[in-house]
Image (cartoon, grey):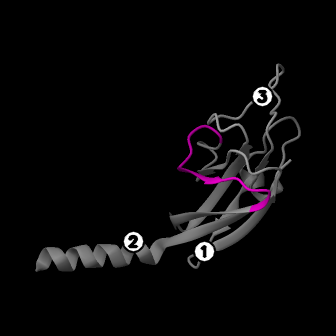
Amino acid sequence: MSKLILASLLAVCFSAHAADLTIHVDGVASAEGNVMIAVYNSADTFLAKPLRAVQAPAHNGTVEVKVADLLVGDYAFAVYHDANANGKMDRNMVGMPTEDYAFSNNAFGKRGAPRFEEARIVLPADGALTAVNLR
């Protein structure tokens, strides 16, 4: 009986601090491939080691993706339309992306990706809804 109570308390504690991040990805150009999202929780890991990666089938227009059970806090994410479903961001010969992409807050860096601070969003206890436009 005590193990059951402990498990119940842990589940309540975890769910009390977990929130969902819902992302509307606008500007998906086709129904081919997948919309890929990588979520980061620090400047040290931004664009190097995602905390969570999720994907959803693409369809023309807006794709809604939910990242469930994140701890309340600061996050940034990168998203791209993997139109050919090869599991990677395709680039041209000089390294520029050839597939549509975006970052949280629709942030863009001056010469490449934005910094974590520019893309940072706050996830409150009741969750958040955000939108980005693919470019």
Task: Identify the secondary structure beneath mark 3.
Answer: loop
The answer to whether 51 is drawn above or below residue 10 in the figure is: above
User: For mark 3, does the 10 Å Cα neighbourhood hold few (<14), some (14 to 19), or many (20 or more) residues?
Assistant: few
Residue under numbered circle 1: 127
Task: Identify the secondary structure beneath mark 2.
Answer: helix
Bounds of the magenta span?
Answer: 47-62
Outermost residue, top side = 93
Label 1 – label 2 distance at C-alpha: 14 Å
Mark closer to the observer (1, 3): 3
Residue found 67% across the figure and 52% down from its top: 77
Residue found 73% across the figure and 53% down from its top: 117
User: Which is nearer the N-term, disc 3 or disc 2?
Assistant: 2
Quarter of the image with the N terminus is bottom left
Disc number at residue 74?
Answer: none
User: For mark 1, does the 10 Å Cα neighbourhood hold few (<14), some (14 to 19), or many (20 or more) residues?
Assistant: some
Residue type of the residue flagged with mark 2: Phe
Disc number at residue 14?
Answer: 2
The image shows residue 34 at horizontal and vertical percentages of 66, 48
Q: Nearer the viewer, residue 15 or 134?
A: 134
Mark closer to the observer (3, 2): 3
- 9 displayed left or right of 59: left
Residue 51 lies in the magenta-colored region: yes
Residue under numbered circle 3: 91
Look at the numbered discs 3 and 2 and tell me whether their residues touch, using CB distance below 8 Å: no
